[in-house]
Image (tube, helix red, strand yellow):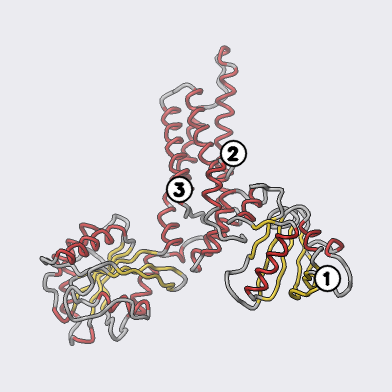
Amino acid sequence: MNVSDIICAVSTAPGMGAIAVIRLSGQGCIALVDQLYESPSGKSLQEAAANTVRFGRIVEKGKVVDEVLVTVFHMPHSFTGEESVEIACHGSVYIQQQLLKLLVDTGARLATPGEFTQRAFLNGKMDLSQAEAVADLIASSSAASHRMAISQMKGGFSAELMKLRAELLRITSLLELELDFSEEDVEFADRSELLRLAGNIEALLERLCHSFSLGNVIKNGVPVAIVGNTNVGKSTLLNALLQEEKAIVSDIAGTTRDVIEDTINLNGITFRFIDTAGIRTTSDEIENMGIERTFSKISQASVVLLLTDLQRGVERFEEYYCEVKKHLADSAELIVVLNKTDQVDDLLTPQETIRFFTSGEKIIPISARTGFNLEFLIHELTDVVNLNELNPSDVIVSNVRHYEALRQAHLAVERVISGLSSGLSGEFVSQDIRECLHYLGEITGEITTDEVLGNIFKNFCIGK
């Protein structure tokens, strides 16, 4: 990639719309567009003040291609930090392609995926973690994921890492100063103070690593497994929650043999609901494969809805309850759902019986068919995730690359604490600190490779 090229791309969504925006960046891009631009006033774009919009026409060999609004940005006050132009044209796909062809013929080249954001990173407009947050912001599908991406893009995560790096540099500078005067046996660093600082850093890294489990579900959706015996209404509940006929509903036992998944936004949170095969003993090989997948999904879920059919009473409920608990992840929540309330007269007796089997889980009576109590179930689901208690200033890690780097940095700091506690030579302790600094630098892009940058930005959409 040649960063001195003038690049161009359609930045709005593919296809036809009312308006499309074509973006250019690179030294000379204003003059390039000026060659194709005609203003009713006769003024050129190069005369335009920074951050201003001009009305005019894009012309090819005297023929008007489209009437446009052109926004001019002067370096370094643009998204990329370079001279930039944005052309707002009519949203015809033909017009978009004609304008791109004109720009390329005049000297620009088509941008690669994420190249505008990559230039912003290379020009110091943002660090690498903020650049990645741009992609998360574009992909955000809920209020929670939007809030998290905005916080990271504004530099909340970067600010935490800067504080960590400053503390680590302070420790290592004192230790390495001692090495310069090793023959004089001078101690510049108070080991107890260094140990306290390292402990604070370790606690912060542990908190950031721990936040990944929440950040991951916010970004990708909270996985909710709907499990239970055959014909208790799992597929009916899935359809009711999604408000569409996603799963086949039948009175025949074992209808659902494979995992069915779909996502929906509930109260600003994305949930990924998973309808599973009914748990039962069967000789059907295919159905048994589906049941095995059910247990696998239980272990991966953040929330498990264990359904039972009130019409049947609580026959064999304890067996299913114990089987589900055995596969449940340590951090997962289990909610017992009593379905088909519309088909029974007395809710208290079976509900109290189930309470005897369970160990404090919420028990919610519903009717997936009529919608009775579904709103309450949705409220309980959003309450389990408990995003409302998150402080807007809290830093949440949602990127796997960041998590892996933080985990390695945490291990390095643990070795620092161990070395300081055991009186290890400052030379070896400093090496572990440098390793920690290396991993933190990988997150922000202070230490990176072309391969890493390529892997990150290739997942961006073209034009961003």
Q: Earlier in the sequence, mark 3 or mark 2?
A: 2
User: As shown in the figure, which amino acid type bears the numbered disc 1?
Assistant: Glu
Of residues 187 and 395, the one drawn nearer to the viewer in this rendering: 395
Q: Where is residue 64 in the image (x, y as percent from the top left)?
A: 78, 75
Q: Mark 1 points at which residue?
A: 38
Of residues 431 and 170, the one drawn nearer to the viewer in this rendering: 431
Q: Where is residue 121 in the image (x, y as percent from the top left)?
A: 63, 49
Question: Residue at 39% across / 64% down in the picture?
Answer: 222
- Quadrant into which the C terminus falls: bottom right
Outermost residue, top side? 183
Vertical arrangement, residue 40 with respect to residue 283, above or below: below
For label 1, the crowd category at 10 Å Cα-Cα, with few meaning under 14, some 14 to 19 and many 20 or more, is many
Q: Are marks 3 and 2 in contact (CB under 8 Å)?
A: no
User: As shown in the figure, which amino acid type bears the numbered disc 3?
Assistant: Tyr
Query: In terms of secondary structure, where does tag 1 sit?
Result: strand
Viewer-side label of 3, 1: 1
Q: Quadrant of residue 30?
A: bottom right
Vertical arrangement, residue 24 with respect to residue 440, above or below: below
Question: Residue at 62% across / 54% down in the picture?
Answer: 115
Alpha-carbon span between mark 3 and mark 2: 20 Å
Vertical arrangement, residue 23 with respect to residue 374, above or below: above
Q: Which of marks 2 and 1 is nearer the N terminus?
A: 1
Question: Residue at 76% across / 76% down in the picture?
Answer: 67
Vertical arrangement, residue 242 with respect to residue 178, above or below: below
Q: Name the residue under label 3.
A: 403
User: As shown in the figure, which amino acid type bears the numbered disc 2?
Assistant: Ala
Query: In terms of secondary structure, where does tag 2 sit?
Result: helix
Alpha-carbon span between mark 3 and mark 1: 51 Å
Q: Please indicate whether residue 173 sits to the left or right of residue 330 in the image.
A: right
Q: Mark 2 points at which residue?
A: 166
For label 3, the crowd category at 10 Å Cα-Cα, with few meaning under 14, some 14 to 19 and many 20 or more, is many
Q: Are marks 3 and 1 in contact (CB under 8 Å)?
A: no
